[in-house]
Amino acid sequence: MKILNSTRWDTKDIEKLFKRIVREVDRVEKPCMPFRRRAKFYVLTIENRHNGFAMNGHARLGGYSMYLKLGTEKSKGLNEMDFETKQKLARMIIHEYWHNLGYTLQDKNNYKCDTSDNCNVDYIKEYPIRLKSIMKEPKIDIKLQRYQRAIQNLTKAETRYKRAKTLFQKWSKQVNRYQKTYNYGNKGLIEQIQEGDSAGRLDKHGNIIY
């Protein structure tokens, strides 16, 4: 079951109440397609009206969806939906769920055939509908984030430094070895390259190629 809830009431609480109501309807009506078989594909949309106290809704006839609109609530300012509002909500769910089961007579002659008012919904007392819990985002410590990032960058720099130091030592040893071989002594690198160019290139065995 999927619930699209834009009201201030807790989605889990609404789901518990809704499932109990449709279970009671299924127990009386005994449909060939009870809610437990519809639940996987069922979508309940519930939101607030912009103005007005009346609730309204509609449901797909023989289908798997229901749309409910709550009016301006007497529960405003309270942490839990009052019994009267919850009772109206329960009866509206019953009415619309009958449409899901394929019934249409309750809408005949301007709802004069609607018997949802006769349904016993005292069990809704067991299902409180509370306000949504507001999750406060933890305060971000910017300095701590920068410190952690600096540690990461230092670790990377240290790794690069060690690799560069290893390469420097490797090539320094190789240059020193060639300096001894060709008696360059302490001449600078540029002078060595210039002399090498004037004398000719060296093959892999160290012989001058003219």
Image: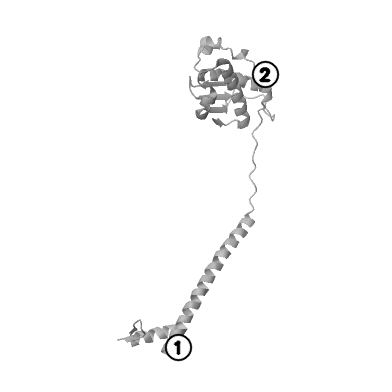
**Vertical placement of 120 versus 146: above or below?**
above
- Horizontally, residue 144 falls left or right of residue 163, namely right
Can you tell which quarter of the image residue 127 is in? top right
Q: Nearer the viewer, residue 39 or 136?
A: 39
Element class at badge 1: helix
Q: Is residue 114 left or right of residue 139?
A: left
**Residue at left 54%, top 25%?**
36
Front-most of residues 30 and 160? 30
Percent position of residue 160, x then y: 52, 68
Which secondary structure, mark 2? helix
Q: Where is 137 relative to 106, above or below?
A: below
Quarter containing the N terminus: top right
**Disc 1 residue type (three-letter):** Lys
Residue underneath mark 2: 122
**Going by the picture, which residue comes out furthest to the left?**
210
The residue that mark 1 highlights is: 180
Q: Vertically, is 142 above or below 171?
A: above
Quarter of the image with the C terminus in it: bottom left
- Spot occupied by residue 158 in the image (x, y as percentages of width and height): 56, 68
Tell me the quarter of the picture where residue 189 sits.
Answer: bottom left
Residue 180 location in percent, x, y?
A: 45, 88
